[in-house]
């Protein structure tokens, strides 16, 4: 006869999650200063190390064609010297803007997004700016990093140098990307005072969304996160507007979301929500893919 032994439930000990190392691309300029300042503040508050990465390159095709090999070689040498000066300026700006944080500095002559992806193994979180109109030879397209780095990516909104993180909105959708984003965001969620798990769905999906978000909140509680649910029904496609409205109403300066998209011949195709966050977020956004 099989005997069942019942043991009393043991107290769950929640160990806070953290980011031990942050990685940020730095170049001369105001946009970079805000990004580095935000990364440095976060690193100081977490007791984390901040790696600054200076990366820039040139297109060899621009120095071929009408030039002789000798002239082209001279031009390449001059361009490389200019890149070296730019990277030195980036290091000076980084050390100024990251003052007080524990830092490392690295330089790579390569496309910045590729340099970040290739250095992602050294960090837990990558900090970038929204997509800009600057050349990919000097600046980072966050889409490239989000899709390839295998690390959560924090996008710093224009003009903002300080993430408070007291209130956080999780843009919930039952996908692999969003489930990963929840885990990747635990260091922020465990430190927040108010976490809202928000589902924006069509009217006929409300009941399912309530069931799912209740499950998410229950699981987060086991990780030491006191969260609450919010389900909004809409009949149009303005999901990103509803997410940002919820963040504003709840004084949340961080939105956590899954990055939905795919790559084909290096052309990025994203859904409307992810694309908005990549271009012009009004809050800090943590994206995972």
Image (cartoon, helix red, strand yellow):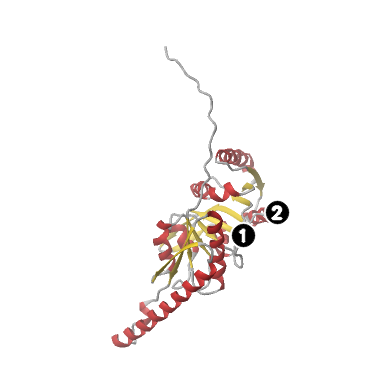
- Secondary structure at badge 2 equals helix
- Secondary structure at badge 1 equals loop
Mark 2 lies on residue = 249
In this rendered view, identify the residue nearer to me: 50 or 223.
Answer: 50
Residue 133 in the image, given as x and y percentages of width and height: 52, 72
Residue 260 in the image, given as x and y percentages of width and height: 51, 54
Residue 175 in the image, given as x and y percentages of width and height: 51, 47
Decide if residue 130 is in sight here. no
Q: Is residue 154 above or below residue 198?
A: below
Spot the residue most to the front: 100
Q: CA distance from mark 2 to mark 1?
A: 12 Å
Q: Residue at x 36, y 78 (%)?
A: 61
Q: Residue at x 41, y 77 (%)?
A: 84
In this rendered view, identify the residue nearer to me: 79 or 137.
Answer: 79
Q: To which quarter of the image does residue 161 belong?
A: bottom right
246 vs 178, left or right, is right
Q: Which mark is residue 283?
A: 1
> What is the crowding at mark 2: few (fewer than 14 residues within 10 Å), some, or many (at least 20)?
few
Residue 47 in the image, given as x and y percentages of width and height: 52, 55
Q: Residue at x 61, y 49 (%)?
A: 192
209 vs 92, left or right, is right
Quadrant for the N terminus in the image = top left
Decide if residue 52 is in sight here. yes
Marks counted in the figure total 2
83 vs 202, left or right, is left
Spot the residue most to the left: 69
């Amino acid at each position: 006869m099989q005997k069942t032994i019942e043991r009393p439930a043991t107290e769950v000990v929640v160990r806070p999650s953290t980011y031990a190392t942050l990685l940020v691309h730095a170049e001369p300029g105001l946009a970079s200063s805000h990004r580095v300042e935000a990364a440095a503040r976060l690193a100081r508050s977490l007791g984390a190390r901040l790696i600054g990465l200076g990366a820039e390159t040139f297109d060899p095709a621009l120095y071929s064609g009408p030039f002789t090999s000798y002239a082209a070689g001279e031009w390449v040498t001059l361009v490389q010297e200019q890149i070296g000066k730019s990277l030195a300026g980036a290091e000076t700006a980084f050390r100024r803007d990251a003052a007080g944080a524990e830092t490392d500095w690295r330089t790579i002559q390569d496309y910045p997004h590729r340099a970040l992806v290739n250095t992602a193994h050294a960090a837990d979180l990558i900090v970038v700016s929204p997509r800009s109109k600057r050349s990919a030879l000097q600046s980072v397209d966050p889409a490239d990093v989000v899709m390839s780095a295998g690390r959560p990516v924090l996008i710093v909104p224009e003009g903002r140098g300080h993430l408070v993180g007291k209130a956080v909105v999780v843009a919930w959708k039952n996908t692999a990307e969003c489930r990963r984003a929840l885990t990747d965001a635990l260091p922020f969620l465990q430190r927040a005072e108010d976490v809202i798990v928000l589902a924006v769905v069509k009217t006929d999906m409300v009941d399912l969304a309530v069931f799912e978000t209740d499950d998410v909140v229950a699981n987060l509680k086991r990780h030491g996160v006191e969260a609450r649910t919010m389900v909004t029904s809409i009949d149009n496609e303005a999901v990103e507007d509803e997410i940002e409205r919820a963040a504003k109403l709840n004084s949340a300066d961080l939105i956590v979301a899954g990055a939905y998209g795919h790559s084909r011949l290096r052309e990025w195709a994203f859904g409307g929500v992810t694309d908005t966050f990549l271009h012009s977020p009004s809050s800090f956004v943590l994206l995972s893919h």
